[in-house]
Amino acid sequence: MTSDRTHPSSEPEARTRLHIPNQNHNDIPKVIGLDVAMGITGIAGDGWTDYVKAKGASQHSRFEQQLAGIADHIRHARFVVIEGAAFSKNNNGADALSAMRWMVRHELWKRRIPYAVVNPDQRIIYAVGTAAPKDPDTGLRLKGVPLKAVVRQAVADTYGIVTEGEAKYDEADAHILYAMGLHWLGHPLAVVPDTHRRALDAVRWPDREAVTAR
């Protein structure tokens, strides 16, 4: 198997985290955020981000590399939040990516790990308050790399997690998914406005007791 991973990203000393009195950190379920992709999958957990990079020559080898790398991170998870499909996208790689996401879900099902699927719009809303942020100079809707950069900056500003390297956008996306999962469980990482929090209401979450009772 060939996979590249970053070490946990450096974080500033003054990391923004919501203080919840009388809360034992050990009582918080282990949550993992996954931004699944065929090439680079972003992964996030408590205070860290990482990634798996598949370099296989064939589709099947890339599937295998991604699944093996992801399995290393979800092994002891109690809850996983996965990015779902962007239904507006229709390209040659969409079929393989859909298959990859379903294989990850199936792996979680086999391990009896509850999971939730968050679509990209809800992830962006939770990060920046709107699914269609605009360039402050031009007023035009951000797309592509500029949109990814806005989400990455939101992760740095809100959570003190600065992602770097070739997987920086994937890791930032994964961290938002991780934060959403913890927030839904009642352990928000930071105070977020209602304009951001509303994204949680659009997600189909599993039974909460199925997560907390594990």
Image (cartoon, rainbow, N blue to C red):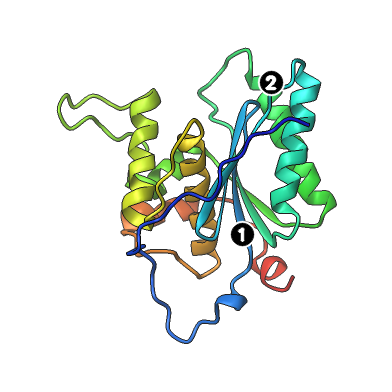
Q: CA distance from mark 1 to mark 2?
A: 27 Å
Identify the image quadrant of the N terminus: top right
The residue at 51%/36% (across/down) is 170
Secondary element under disc 2, as helix, strand or loop, is helix
Q: Nearer the viewer, mark 1 or mark 2?
A: 1
| Dot 2 amino acid type | Asp
Q: How far from the left and from the top, in percent, is residue 210?
A: 72, 67
Q: Nearer the viewer, residue 96 or 195?
A: 96
Question: In the figure, is residue 135 to the left or right of 201?
Answer: left
154 in relation to 148, above or below? below
Q: Earlier in the sequence, mark 1 or mark 2?
A: 1
Q: How far from the left and from the top, in percent, is residue 88?
A: 50, 23
Q: How far from the left and from the top, in percent, is residue 81?
A: 60, 50
Furthest toward the left, the residue is 137
22 in relation to 146, above or below? below
| Dot 1 amino acid type | Val
Q: Residues within 10 Å of mark 1 (few under 14, many from 20)?
A: many
Q: Quadrant of residue 214?
A: bottom right
The residue at 77%/39% (across/down) is 68
Secondary element under disc 1, as helix, strand or loop, is strand
127 in relation to 31, above or below? above
* Residue holding disc 2: 95
* Residue holding disc 1: 31
Question: In the figure, is residue 77 to the left or right of 172?
Answer: right
97 in relation to 73, above or below? above
Q: How far from the left and from the top, in percent, is residue 160?
A: 37, 56
Residue 172 is marked as none
The residue at 33%/34% (across/down) is 132
